[in-house]
Amino acid sequence: MTYVLERLEIGGSDWPAMTDAQQAGTIFQTPAWLAFLTETQQGELVLARLKDGDDVRGLFAGVIVNKYGVRILGSPFPGWSTDYMGLMLSPGVVRRGAIEALMEFAFHQLGCLHFEMMDRQITETDLADLGVRYRLYRSFEVDLSQNESDLFSKMTSACRRCIRKAEKEGVFVEEAHDSAFADEYYAQLQDVFAKQALLPTYGIERVRRLIYHLQPIGQLLLLRARDRTGRCIATGIFPYWSGVMYFWGGASWRHSQCLRPNEVLQWHAMRIGKSRDIRIYDLGGGGEYKRKYGGADVAVPWFHKSKYGWVRCLREWAERGHKIRREGRGQLVRLLGRSLSRGEQGTGSMSQVTQR
């Protein structure tokens, strides 16, 4: 069999099919998320159908961006705050053949010089001998179909103690729908990064646009944790679709972390997910601190291929440059912190500026 990809007209009659393919799709392939993605990345949306002769066997969604004069097709691309995209395929489709058709489509029909994809259903075996490079994107998945007591018992004992402590200290969690949420979340995120002398990897506008596009379709859970005085001390963002919920981002004030708001936020997200018939909770990436929530390990290949060798080298150079710039910003933040600290000791008034 020979698969081919045929590009669809945006806004045409085939557009609703993207929402009908829930059995194979993710929230990151829905029209709302793709609108968020093209807007925040200033990219060109690509929708295509996979055909085997006259039969349509699947759909593809991606975005083309221009980096250093090079057209890149991402589905997704690093830095987009987006997880699994790729292909939505009918049963029986050979994924290896679909990937080969997709690379042909990217390089020859779309004129891209570089292509990246992460598909939840693709395995390392599917990529063998295709000449691609990949890294394993690691995460954890919690089975929300189990009863609540089993869900709680599978967390580590330390995690359970943190949740009980938060409740004992009067921390309570509420669902948010107001416009102030993005500002609260981002202020706390800045505080999280400041702990490591870093700056957030994205701006507040990305959070605002996510809420703008996802909240109207009812597929976004926003939670805030408050202390017993009513002050917001932690926030969490959880998009969900077709029985799967994802942890997009969470943040909290450092001075209130002793109340353990982050753990209780996660617990409430799981309970709310269960009430909405969500079967799987994906914790949205690796990090040993996430293991305490009792999820199973997940490893998905995030692969890329360049049409020419020099493009691959350019990508690797850009990746190293991004790391150097982040480390440089971190050094600047540390230097400013030392300077402000000396100012506080010398004048007594500088602390008014730095306190929040």
Image: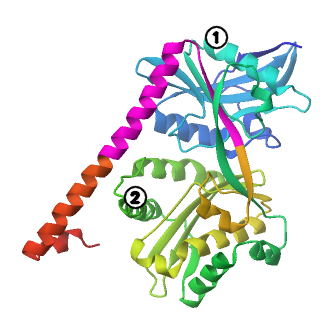
In the rendered view, tell whether residue 95 sits above or below residue 242.
above
* Front in this rendered view, residue 33 or 3: 3
Question: Which quadrant of the figure contains the N terminus?
Answer: top right
Q: How many marks?
A: 2
Residue 219 visible, this angle: no
Q: Which residue is mark 2?
A: 193
Q: Is residue 302 magenta?
A: yes
**Quarter of the rendering containing residue 272:** bottom right
* Front in this rendered view, residue 61 or 138: 138
In percent of width and height, residue 27 lies at: 68, 46
Q: Please give left or right for residue 116 compared with residue 348 in the image.
A: right
Residue span colored magenta: 300-328
In percent of width and height, residue 162 lies at: 60, 80
In the rendered view, tell whether residue 224 sits above or below residue 230.
above
Say what amino acid the circle numbered 2 marks: Phe
Question: Which quadrant of the figure contains the C terminus?
Answer: bottom left
Q: Please give left or right for residue 169 compared with residue 105 in the image.
A: left
Mark in the foreground, 2 or 1: 2
Q: Please give left or right for residue 25 compared with residue 65 in the image.
A: right
- Residue at (47%, 76%) from the top-left corner? 257
Say what amino acid the circle numbered 1 marks: Gln
Q: Which residue is mark 1?
A: 109
Q: Is residue 338 magenta?
A: no
